[in-house]
Amino acid sequence: MFSQQLIDFGRKPNVIRELSAYAGRRKQEIGPENVFDFSIGSPNVPAPPQVHAAMLDLLTNADPVAIHAYTGASGALETRQAIADSITRRFGHHVDPEGVFVTAGASGALAMALKGLTNPGDEVIIFKPHYMEYLIYTEAYGAVPVVVSTEEGSFQLDPDKLEAAITEKTRVVILNSPNNPAGVVYTADRLRAVTGLMARKQREYGHPIFLLSDEPYRELSYGAEVPWLMDYYDNTLVCYSYSKTLSIPGERMGYLAICRRCACFADVLDACAGAARALGHICASNLYQRVITRCVDVVADVDYYRQNRDLLVSGLEDMGFTCVRPDGAFYLFLKSPTADSMEFCQKAKEYEVMVVPGHDFGVPDYLRVSYCVARETIERSMPAFRKLADFYGLKK
């Protein structure tokens, strides 16, 4: 009667949200100051003042009917033009407004693109560690996820491993830089090698291989260059979110941008539009599209996250923990003192520390610590982490 696959998706635990809910209950029981919740990647930096100013002006002065009306299915032309213009100013003329869809965050863009670009049986290459929902987005449309390891220790891309995994069935490769969960920024050299390999393989196989660049953390970089992949590879679609850039995750605003040089551009455009229609991903919030139009180049306070990173990394390394120093995003990938990070995360809960095991990210011997939290949370958590380090016998 029902789709067993969708029932399974619905019943599959989301460990991040379960941990966040548990932390919420513990805060009520013992006080928020005694709970150290590093589970969820929800920005704690306030939205920039320009966002609030734009909202207030629109609600006060704009036509009260027009700001709540439907836009075009792919978004308001003014917003799509603003996004295309912003990309052109920053990276060159890679995108035209007709190739921009305003979406419900990067997740909406990913789901729409994967639905539009794949047929059942097509393969989608995903590098681990990876955002856990990639597998669901891929499998939901009948495509096959092919998970490829990155370089041990650094989690940089390994072109040789990609070459071993890519086949004639490969239709899409997903890249996520800065990376969730590791905070790694893929280097330009590795990206050139990967995209060069993809270009050779699509010529060999005689069909396009599309690159989905998942970029919700693009602006959250701490000095590392975040290459623009349309510079390297024409068959690129960028999935972007304003959730972190503008600290508005609950407003669900993002876009899908298709490179103007993409092979079969018209078909890709129509396939993505058809996917949006089939999935109901049309007509994003009118009010917030207008806010994005006004704030398209505004960025929240990234330096706050950098300071949090430095405080957390130095504190944990001094205790003997091993981590991958993040160059972007707001996640620290910590080597578990035990082979199974689930065990460590359960022990951490005894000290009211909520961190996410690496299993669903594809790397079970690491764990994710989300540091988009109040500075005081990091400072107060250090004695609890020290107890964990002592329990596992860690030494600097």
Image (cartoon, helix red, strand yellow):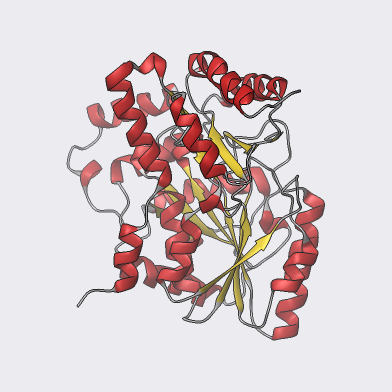
In the picture, measured across the screen, residue 126 lies left or right of residue 35, that is right
Instruction: Say which residue appears at 33% left-offset and 22% top-offset.
Output: 27
Is any atom of residue 97 visible in this view? no
Task: Say which quadrant the C terminus sits in.
Answer: top right
Question: Which x, y percent locates residue 185?
Answer: 69, 43
In the rendered image, residue 182, in percent from the top left (x then y), is placed at 63, 42
Q: Nearer the viewer, residue 46 or 7?
A: 7
In the depicted structure, whether residue 189 falls above or below residue 367: below
Residue at 50%, 40% (x, y): give it.
356
Q: Please determine whether, in this image, residue 136 is positioned above or below residue 366.
A: below
Q: Where, by quadrant of the figure, is residue 16 drawn? A: top left
Question: x%, y% of residue 269?
Answer: 48, 70
- Number of on-image labels: 0
Above or below, 291 against 198 in this view is above
Q: Nearer the viewer, residue 126 or 345?
A: 345
Residues 258 and 226: in front is: 226
Task: Please state if 117 lies on the left or on the right of 315 as rendered.
Answer: left
Q: Quadrant of the N terminus?
A: bottom left
Out of 1 and 134, give the one closest to the viewer. 1
**Side of 22 relative to 113 (left or right):** left
Residue 330 x, y percent position in the rendering: 57, 33
Q: Quadrant of residue 341?
A: top right
The residue lying furthest to the left in this view is 65
- Say if residue 91 shows up in the picture: yes
What residue appears at the point 63 percent right and 68 percent down from the top-left corner?
A: 235
